[in-house]
C-alpha cells in the first residue's frame, strides 16, 4: 500500500480518534474505508480522510451522527460549505469568549477591594455564564450587556438585593398550596417588572433565561429558581391580569 493509504490504527493515532470510533463510523455507513483486504483490514485514502474531516466539523457544530449522514447526502453540500459553516461557528464562539473575558473584568472591578474577588465568586460566575450561554444566543447576550449598562451599577445592585427577597416571598406563597392569593399576584407583577427591566421587554430573551434556569440544576441551587416556581409565578400573573 502506498503512503496515501492509512490503516485504521494509524488514522486513529494521527487524528486523536479511537479505533472504536472509526469502526463505529464504518458500521453505520458514515465513513467506509475505500479499501479492505481479504483479511478484513481497513485502509483509508485521501477522499476518506476528507470525508472524516467533514464529519468532525459537523460533529463540533453539534449535529448527531444521523444528522451528519443526512447532511453529507444532501445535494449541493460541499466540503467548502461545511468548512465555512464551521469557521462561522468558531468565530461566534471566539466572540462569546471575548464577551466572557469582559464580564470577568467587570466582575473584578465590581469586587475591587484590597483582596479582590474570591476564588469561589469567580468560579460561580464562570459556572453561571457557561450554563447561560447554552441557552442564550450571542445577540441576546449582547442585549443583556446593553441593558446592564443602561440600568447602571445602582440599578443593578438594587435589583440584585430585591430578587432574593422576591423569590423567597413567592416561594412562601407557593408553599401554601392554594390558588395564588392577592399577595402572590402583587409579587408576580413585580417579578415581571424586574424581568422586563433586564430583558428590555424581549419575550424571547426572557424565555431563554427561564429555560436556562429550568434545565440547569446548578442555577436552581444557586438562585432558588426552578420550573415549579416559574409555573406558579405564571399562574399568579395570569390571575392578576384577569382581575385587572
Image (cartoon, rainbow, N blue to C red):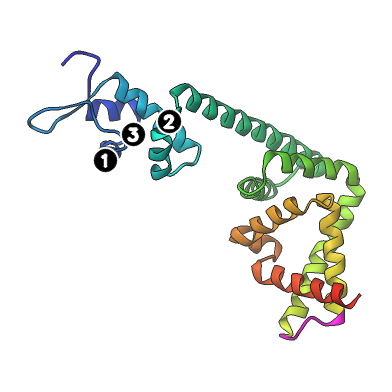
Q: CA distance from mark 2 to mark 3?
A: 28 Å
Q: Position of residue 76 (x, y in %)?
A: 45, 27
Give the residue pinned by disc 1. 20
Please report the residue visible at 43 percent of the width from the left and 30 percent of the height from the top. Answer: 75
Magenta segment's dominant SS is loop
Is residue 178 shown in magenta? yes
Q: Quadrant of residue 158?
A: bottom right
Residue stretch rendered in magenta on the structure = 177-182
Give the residue pinned by disc 3. 17
Q: Tell me if I can see residue 92 in this picture.
A: yes
Q: Tell me if I can see residue 113 in this picture.
A: no
Q: Secondary structure at mark 1?
A: helix
Q: Residue furthest top?
A: 2
Please report the residue visible at 61 percent of the width from the left and 33 percent of the height from the top. Answer: 93
Quadrant of the image containing the N terminus: top left
Q: Position of residue 238 (x, y in %)?
A: 80, 72
Q: Is residue 151 left or right of residue 80?
A: right
Q: Quadrant of residue 43?
A: top left
Give the residue pinned by disc 2. 75
Q: Position of residue 210 (x, y in %)?
A: 69, 58
Please report the residue visible at 12 percent of the width from the left and 33 percent of the height from the top. Answer: 40
Q: Which marked residue is nearer to the observer: mark 2 or mark 1? A: 2
Amino acid at each position: 500500500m502506498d503512503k496515501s493509504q492509512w490503516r485504521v490504527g494509524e488514522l486513529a493515532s494521527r487524528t486523536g480518534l479511537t479505533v472504536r470510533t472509526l469502526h463505529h463510523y464504518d458500521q453505520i455507513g458514515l465513513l467506509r474505508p475505500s479499501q479492505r483486504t481479504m483479511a478484513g483490514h481497513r485502509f483509508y485514502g485521501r477522499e476518506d480522510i476528507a470525508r472524516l474531516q467533514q464529519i468532525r466539523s459537523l460533529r463540533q457544530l453539534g449535529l448527531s451522527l444521523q444528522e451528519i449522514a443526512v447532511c453529507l447526502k444532501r445535494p449541493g453540500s460541499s466540503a467548502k460549505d461545511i468548512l465555512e459553516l464551521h469557521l462561522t461557528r468558531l468565530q461566534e464562539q471566539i466572540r462569546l469568549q471575548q464577551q466572557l473575558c469582559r464580564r470577568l473584568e467587570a466582575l473584578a472591578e465590581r469586587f475591587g477591594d484590597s483582596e479582590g474577588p474570591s476564588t469561589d465568586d469567580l468560579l460561580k460566575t464562570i459556572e453561571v455564564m457557561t450554563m447561560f450561554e447554552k441557552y442564550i444566543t450571542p445577540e441576546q447576550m449582547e442585549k443583556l450587556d446593553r441593558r446592564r449598562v443602561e440600568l447602571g451599577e445602582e440599578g443593578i445592585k438594587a435589583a440584585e438585593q430585591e430578587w432574593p427577597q422576591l423569590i423567597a416571598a413567592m416561594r412562601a406563597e407557593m408553599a401554601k398550596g392554594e390558588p395564588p392569593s392577592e399577595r402572590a399576584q402583587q409579587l408576580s407583577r413585580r417579578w415581571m417588572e424586574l424581568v422586563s427591566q433586564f430583558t428590555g421587554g424581549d419575550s424571547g430573551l426572557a424565555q431563554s433565561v427561564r429555560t436556562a434556569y429550568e434545565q440547569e440544576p446548578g442555577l436552581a441551587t444557586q438562585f432558588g429558581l426552578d420550573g415549579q416556581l416559574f409555573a406558579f409565578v405564571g399562574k399568579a400573573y395570569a390571575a392578576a391580569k384577569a382581575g385587572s
